[in-house]
Image: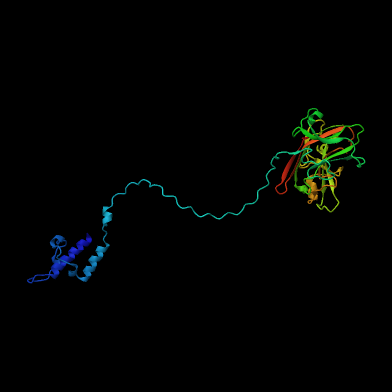
Amino acid sequence: MRAKWVVTTAVAAALLGGFGSAGAARLLTGNDIRDRSIHGRDIARNSIYSSNLSPGLRRATLGQNSNSQSPTQNQANSGTQGATGAQGPKGDKGDKGDKGDSGSQGPQGPEGPEGPPGTATLVTPFANFTQNANGPAAQWAPDQFDCNTQSNAGTGTQGFINGISQDFNGEDTPQGSGAYEFNNTGNNSVDTAYVLHNGAFEGTRLSDLTTLRFSEIWTGSGPDDSPYIELRVDPDGNPGTENNVVLFFIPSNQNGVAGSPHQGDEKPGIWQTWNAGLPGAVFTINGDNNNTTTLAQFTQANPHAELRASQFEGAIRVAAGCGQNTGSNFKAAVDNVVVGTGAGAGKTVVYDFEAS
């Protein structure tokens, strides 16, 4: 409004000052006009143009018009903000992104516990057994000799028997109905070694032997008549050297002897299972009760030790007789022999002895 008043004033002044009649006696000035006495209605529309104004007045009026604030058409027409509209429908699924780079392989986890053995391997006179091997066999074979002379077969018999519970007061076997029996109850019997030996693990590192168990039953004069395990070992792992030793696992020693875990008292007439692979289980070296070791101690001292067969027998043996107090009139049987190794893929074999 201020700009409009300035233009009106300027126009009135121009009319009065610049356009007098021919008969005017003098020039009218601002002093002759009362303030605010001339209004826009006193000036005819389109009778004065900006070209009729002086340059200075034109600049003044145009500058004030440019600084005036007048609402735009859009502003004038805009109303109050409306309510938010409803959410639109979900857009289409975007394209699948590129596959990311593979991450680096993590560290290998710890070895898991040993799983249960699979189906038992049947050992019979016709399978996995060689009767007259005269040396190490691919699986099992027998040997027998006089403990005193070692030059003949001694006395007694050995072999597979089904229904063996009849010989041991109805005691059933751990596997199936049969077992492998050592019988030294004949007349004029002498102390005889009965050996059931296995050659399937020849050359296995002793440190890879993870499982070694067997079940036995016996009757006789004392615990020395019970079956036991022998491991023939090459300490340096070199077949060309002759320094082999035999490690004896005697069940009656597994009751605290040399710090061994107590696996139970050796008892006649019942089936008992013994764990030769149990940490701390004690072995005698070459049958010397004053020279004992555990498998861990032996492999620590001899890290390259391997199972090594002799000329006559495989490296793993289940035997009876030739004890400190064995002699005549004892009878024993074995079954459920379990051997496991952890090297490579590893394997655990359960041997079930049956007559057929």
Q: Nearest the camera: 261 or 185?
A: 185
Quadrant in the picture for residue 192: top right
Quadrant in which the C terminus is drawn: top right
Q: Position of residue 193 (x, y in %)?
A: 87, 39
In the image, is 115 to the left or to the right of 159? Answer: left
Q: Please identify the quarter of the rendering in which residue 102 is found.
A: bottom right
Asked if residue 166 shows in the view, the reply is yes
Disc count in the image? 0
Give x and y (percent) for residue 138.
78, 45
Q: Quadrant of residue 12?
A: bottom left
The outermost residue toward the top is 169
Q: Position of residue 155 (x, y in %)?
A: 89, 36
Question: Quick check: 48 left or right of 282?
Answer: left
User: Residue reaching furthest left?
Assistant: 23
Q: Position of residue 80 (x, y in %)?
A: 30, 49
Q: Would you place residue 241 above or below residue 285 in this image?
A: below
Between residues 25 and 174, which one lies in front from this camera angle?
A: 174
Q: With respect to residue 311, does 177 lie above or below?
A: above
Instruction: Report whether residue 323 is seen.
Output: no
Q: Is residue 64 above or below residue 171?
A: below
Q: Quadrant of the image for the N terminus?
A: bottom left
In the figure, is residue 285 to the left or right of 4?
right
User: Which one is nearer the viewer's eye here, 263 or 117?
Assistant: 117
